[in-house]
Image: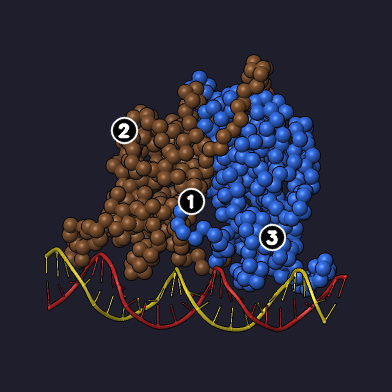
Chain colours: A brown, B blue, C yellow, D red
Amino acid sequence: MPAVGSPHGPNEQAWLAAYDPRAFAPVAVTVDVVALTIRHRDDTGAKALHVLTIRRGGMPYAGHLALPGGFVRAAEDEDLDDAAVRELAEETGLAAHGGGEAGQSRGSGSGAANGRATAARPPIPRLHLEQLGTYGAPGRDPRMRVVSVAYLAFAPDLPDATAGGDAAAASWTPVDTLDPGELAFDHARILSDGLERARAKLEYTPLATAFTGPEFTVTELREVYEAVWGEPLHPGNFHRKVLSVPGFVEDTDTTTARGGARGGRRARLYRAGGARLLHPALLRPSREGNQ
Amino acid sequence: MPAVGSPHGPNEQAWLAAYDPRAFAPVAVTVDVVALTIRHRDDTGAKALHVLTIRRGGMPYAGHLALPGGFVRAAEDEDLDDAAVRELAEETGLAAHGGGEAGQSRGSGSGAANGRATAARPPIPRLHLEQLGTYGAPGRDPRMRVVSVAYLAFAPDLPDATAGGDAAAASWTPVDTLDPGELAFDHARILSDGLERARAKLEYTPLATAFTGPEFTVTELREVYEAVWGEPLHPGNFHRKVLSVPGFVEDTDTTTARGGARGGRRARLYRAGGARLLHPALLRPSREGNQ
DNA sequence: GGAATAGTGTCTATGAGACACTATGAT
DNA sequence: ATCATAGTGTCTCATAGACACTATTCC
């Protein structure tokens, strides 16, 4: 962050009073989190993209699903990123150690920089978090004016969510079986924006590795792409492509302990490389013609 | 926007009171706008990317430059997008008709959809506006907790900005001669994020046409890219490339009235085509290696 | 005519994708 | 042996960029 001149002038009292509380209407600021992970479906067992949802108990939208979220603790000088991590930790029941986190701590930027906010740090290990957008249409919450800063989170397969202090039933829902009409407030729109962002980011960033363990096979990486994009990829071409992008993955010189359950060669293990941008990108198939 | 079930339950009074004002600390919500345009430099006359800035009169940061912005009029149920347009109109002195605007009116989404919010509509014709990100670090404004939703605006060459009601001196500043240290608050960071977003969006969207008039030559379009990316492009290859991307530009079957001032062929005129995404994209040169 | 600007032809290198093939391991 | 999974070879087509060239217009 660039240096900025001192904000303090000679007559401190004069400008400290410059914001007359009557000059603006205060609003409530919340964070909502679109938390995505890859896990096995409960029914078929196939790997699929899941989103963390909570079942609302109270009005409004009682009984509807919603994204985890809550008020920013402004009185405690909580940063927006920190609030997102806290909500996520509370909702998943994952170690609510109130640690600071999320990359470019101060700015709460748009996340375009992909600042590897992730790293390895409890409460939630290997979490990638980035700001998605802010939703503040009047009337989006019938109770009062609420401006919500939405976050997008990627995590490797997490344990089953257990309701935290909010006593709401949190669970992982496959995104492709989720009826948008079941979501409260404007959360269907937020989820839709989050999914599109996730799909796009897999193309030009190594973010797929945020969904895997620290070491992974090319096949596991492909399964991430297939789950997020929702379409099968050619294994052979994918393999060669991934290895050809500089800095995407790094060989560990080890292999899996055994081949597939029903036979098959052992797979080489890789870890995430140093690249923050994929060059050339892995473009989604489909969407041929212009849109 | 997907249909959402009715928020209203049987006992309306009960949940309308559910948000106890003591349960959260209200914060001030503002919008800041990174308004970009291409215009001729005052000194050399060359085309360059300019950003709209205001010179701050009062404390804090008196005398510093800042991005135009101000409070969201929450008491009047003003949407975030509307607030951005209003601030921009006020600051540029451009027809402060308080019109509603900005694409996906309600949602205030992240703008990734590139909803052609632009179109032709006063107050500011051919304006493209999208949300950039939200900046809410505690302490970013020394007076109080302020969460600022930043917007990115692209417009064709606008008239000289005249200070609006805020009595601040608004002016267009070339981005490459702007000292980041001169900017107030965290506006250097916001500007930097906005510039990166603009540069990236030129690659895969037809947004460059938002900087031109309704009809333009391929050379004018190239000058937009050169100004935003800050590097020269090969005229011949750029020409062929632009015409080869389906839906980018559309031939008007007319040409400029005359060739260049010192000779030269007349250029064919184009208008923006229907594509919202460029396929294949126009990738920036430079940045060879990864990272 | 000469210079400037618009626009095209052509060659090369690279990457994406189709498809067939080899390599290794579980049963 | 047979099947499943990992990984490679090779061909074709599309595209990016270098470079040279033609076309048109102003002076």
Label annotation for residue B223:
3
Q: Is label 1 or label 3 in front?
A: 3
Q: Secondary structure at mark 3?
A: helix
Q: Is label 2 or label 3 in front?
A: 3
Q: Is residue C12 above or below residue A155?
A: below
Are labels 1 and 2 assigned to the same chain?
yes
Q: Amino acid at mark 3?
A: Glu
Q: Is residue B86 above or below residue C25?
A: above
Report the Cα–Cα distance between label 1 and label 2. Answer: 27 Å
Label annotation for residue B207:
none
Q: Amino acid at mark 1?
A: Arg
> Whole-percent x and y of residue A247?
39, 57
The chain letter under disc 3 is B
Q: Is residue A230 visible?
A: no
Local crowd size for mark 1, using a 10 Å CA cut-off: few (<14), some (14–19), many (≥20): some
Residue B29 versus residue B34: which sits nearer the camera? Answer: B34
Residue drawn at x 34%, y 65% as measured from the top left: A239
Report the Cα–Cα distance between label 1 and label 3. Answer: 30 Å
Describe residue A74's horizontal placement relative to residue A229 as left or right. right
Are labels 1 and 3 assigned to the same chain?
no
> Whole-percent x and y of residue A3?
57, 34
Q: Which residue is mark 2?
A: A95
Q: Which residue is mark 1?
A: A197
> Whole-percent x and y of residue B239?
66, 70
Q: Secondary structure at mark 1?
A: helix
> Whole-percent x and y of residue B173?
71, 44
Residue B262 versus residue A72: which sits nearer the camera? Answer: B262
Q: Is residue A198 above or below residue B181?
A: below
The chain letter under disc 1 is A
Residue drawn at x 71%, y 36% as measured from the top left: B54
Contact? badges 1 and 3 (CB < 8 Å)? no
Residue drawn at x 37%, y 31% as measured from the top left: A99
